[in-house]
Every structure is written in structure tokens, then in C-alpha cells.
Image: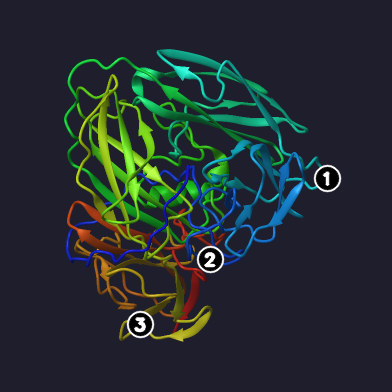
Amino acid sequence: MGRLRLLVAGRRPVSGGRLALLALLVLAGATACQPGGVTGVMVPCTPPSGSVGGCVTNTRGGAAVAGATITASPGGTTTTTDSQGAYSLSLSAGTYDITATKSGMAASKFQSVVVGGQAATANLIMRTVFDPTKPIAAPTISVINLNPGDVVTGTRSFTVNVAASNSVREIDMRISNMNTTPQPPVTDSINATFSLNSTLLANGPAFVDIITYDFNYNAAEVVINFTVNNAPSGAAPATPTGFNLVAVTTGQSLSLFTAQRATTFSQLGIQQDPALLYVDGQSINLLTAPSDTTLFVQASWSSVPTAVGYKIYRSFSATGPFVPVAQRSPSCVPSCVYQDADPSLAPGLPVYYQVSAINAGVESAPTAAVSVTPLAAFNLNLTNPTNNSTGVPTTPAPAFTWTPTALVGEHQGYAIYVWGVNDPTFSWRTTGVDPSLPGVIVDTTTVSYGSIGASTPLQAGKVYQWDIYAAQAQTIYILNVSRAVAVANQSSNPATVFNLPTGSLNGPFKLTTMQ
């Protein structure tokens, strides 16, 4: 599970193309660590050298947890995470539990980390504790009928048992990937039975990743490495086609159990909220909801009829080496998707991917490498008319202005609404944020009332509310192959209108027109 970190020059972006937001399945596998309290993914988490190291984030995909105490047991060796959430420990050869603790945070434990030979990686999740009066202690996972180093042929069932000081909320399991969607989780139970089928995996090293957490957000994780040994059968499948990448950065809070989260996903044209609903019989680990910003890369490709699975490779250099990071099952017709949210991803850092198809121990040639460079977080503040302005003239039409916190991407698209307070509908609203489509405010931070689309005349002496309710930046690297998207805040605000989220950090604003 080692990670290569090599900064290389990115491809020159090219203009054009229609941006269609993907199914934003927010991820299992942490994004770039960042200093605590900073909004936006900043730099990759790079643990210093040591026998074991990793990144600690407040959720997978969220901000770094700086100043957390990391303890290795047995032995009690300790260290503290830096401003990027990184840590490193120098330990003698052996097997250790790595635990993270910090005041106000739930406990987190990565179990059975083997030290010796290659440097080991143990990334940990630490959420804010739900109830400080309840026990703050990481659960313990035990597994029956699957042991490290096992050789697996055919189907293998195994049982997961959890010992915890609080009620267990959920047990999740993934096979040979850290993708957003685990197998269907087991909720409100201290044990679960899962199965794996080796014929759906490539021969060689594989693993299962098991995560559990209790109602106080204490978490535990264990990775069990095993070997797949299928008898080769038949010809290698064809190399997958239609391989493309989308890097997604959100500048918003995707909190647990909120209607705002569901509304945000709806506004982006996403079918379901993966933290609240099941997707094709699978659910997202609720620990993955980030507190500030999420950064991940989605790879997608056309399914191969004879394939029983796929291997995804990643490198931070165009010349490699490409390291396998995941395997996917064949249940992805007509297209397959993998979301990568590794701590080594960061804005401005080009990353390269390939995918191959597998079939009964035989693997196709990989696709040509495709690269993408993620964007920084994109947010904005409303500027004028200022909040609670009075005497705003109705003619000429007033201008509305806003200021991005940073200029991100090659193009920026915005959507605005103006609403007469207590009116049954909007006075004016633009729709869409795709710069390639008509009716979108593109690459400007000011717009006159009613200048795009239909509107009703502003009335004298009336109170209105306005906001940029959606905004997104984008860069097209290779048309229909590689692009990066940054989605603005859309944070929760009780003053939202008709369930529309706010796309600004400080909106919505109110104004009163001149009598």
C-alpha cells in the first residue's frame, strides 16, 4: 500500500467541450491532508520516512487532524501528527495496532499493521466525538476464516466480530479497493458475514478492507492481505475502451444526515445522496462525509463483455511506474467507475491512470495512460448590492456582483436567483453552470438584472433576496477524455429559497428597492 509521490509537469489545458458532472459518490480513502481549519484541499499529505506512517483526517476526504497523538501497541511508542495530518513511527519488526487520539475527537485505530521490509502505511479517520460523556475508545475487529497470507481459490466466506464500548453503528467491507462503495454494510450489529469470490479477482496479491464505527464515531480498520490463485483459463479479454477521468473538488460541507446534502446533490444533477441512500444495493460508509472539502478522481470506462473484473493502475509520472490501486467487479454494464481519493492527490499535482481487464487469471494489456490535474477549491462571496441594502433603483436594472475567493480553472459558470420575499416564485433565475451552454453566466462576476433569460420587472419599495446558488469552475485537458471540476460551497443556510442551496459563502443577501 505504499504510495509514489513525484511531482511532474501537467498537460496544457485545452478549451471547449461540455461539462457534465458525474455521479458524485464521495469516497472511501482520504484526500489530500491539509492544515486543520483551512477550507480547501491544499497540499498532499507526505509522511516522513519511517517503518510505518500515514495521514490522519477528520473524515475520509476531509481536513487533516493536526496534533493527534499516535500510539503503536505493543510498546507504546508515540508521535504527533503535523499540520498536514502526517505522522511516522520507527518500530522494530512486528505487528502493531496504530491508534490516534485527540481531545474532542473520537478514537481511531488501524489494526494489525505489519512492520518489516517495506514501509507500512496506516491512514486513520478521526471524527469529532458525538457525545463526550460516552466512552471514547476505538472498537476492536476480529476476523474468522480469513487470515493474512491465505491463498484463496473460489468462494470464501468469513465472519467479522466487533468488540466496542458503545453500540456498533456499521461494519463495512471492500475487496481489493478503497472505492467509495463497499459491499452492502451490516448495521446495528456486532458481527457480520461476508464472502469473496477469487474468480472475480486477478491472480496475485489482494486484500479486504474492513471498517467499523460505533455511535460515538470511534472507528477501527483492518486490512487483510491474501493471495488469489485462479487456474488460467481462456484468452485474455480485450483492453477496455472509452477510458476517461474527471477530477472533482468540492468547496462545500457534505455533512451527515442533512437535507442540505441531498439538495446539493440534486442541484448538481446527481441521482442520489450516497451518504443517505443505497446505490445499486450498496451504500457509502458514513464516515466518508468530509467536513470541508473533498477531492477525488473518478475513472470510468466501457465494460468488456468477457471480463470478470478490472485492475486500476496509478502513477504520478507519465513514465511510471504504474502501481495497481484497485480492482473492480464486472457488475458495471455498460460502463464502469472507480473513485480514487488517496491522500497523495492534491490540486495542481498531475496524476496518471490506466485500466486493464481480467478473466480467470488472465489480464489484458492496460489502456494508454490518461492524466488529469485536480483544481483547487472554488468558493465565492456576494459583494453588491450589500446585505440589507435599501433604495436600490429598479431602472436602470441593478447589477449584481460577487467575488471568488480564488480564480480557479479555465472557465467559471454561475447561476443566480432574485426572489421577492413571500412571492410564490422567483422574479429572476438563471439555470445551469456549464459554460458551454446558453443561458449561463460565464467568466464574469457581475450581471445585470434580467439580462439572461426571462424575468419579471422589479417592484418599487419591495424586499428581495438574491444569491449565487450554484457555481463551478472547470478545465478541459483532453476533450471527452480528461477534465477537472471544482464545485462551489453550496453550504446550508436557513434563509435558502424553495430548497435551493446557497452557492456563496456569505449569502443570501436581502435588498429593498427604491420607492
Q: Mark 1 or mark 3, which is nearer to you? A: 1
Q: How far apart are the two marked residues, 3 and 2, measured between alpha carbons?
A: 32 Å
The CA span between labels 1 and 2 is 29 Å
Q: Label 1, on which residue?
A: 133
Q: Which of 423 and 27 lies nearest the eye of the viewer?
A: 27
Pointer 3: what residue?
398
Element marked by disc 3: loop
Residue name at image x 45 percent, y 75 percent: 405
Neighbour tally class for label 3: few under 14, some 14-19, many 20 plus, Cα within 10 Å: some
Tell which circle, 1 or 3, labels the residue nearer the N-terminal end: 1
Pick the residue in front: 196 or 250: 196
Of labels 3 and 2, earlier in sequence is 2
Q: Position of residue 392 (x, y in %)?
A: 43, 84
Q: Residue at x 22, y 43 (%)?
A: 243
The mark found on residue 39 in the picture is: 2
Amino acid carrying label 1: it is Thr
Query: How packed is label 2: few (under 14 Cα within 10 Å), some, or many (20 or more)?
Result: some
In which quadrant of the rendered image does the C terminus lie? bottom left
First of labels 1, 2 by sequence position: 2
Q: Residue at x 25, y 74 (%)?
A: 451
Mark 3: which amino acid? Pro
Q: Is residue 473 left or right of residue 405?
A: left
Few, some or many C-alpha atoms within 10 Å of disc 1 (few <14, some 14-19, many ≥20)?
A: few
Percent position of residue 169, x then y:
65, 32
Q: What label does residue 85 carry, if any?
A: none
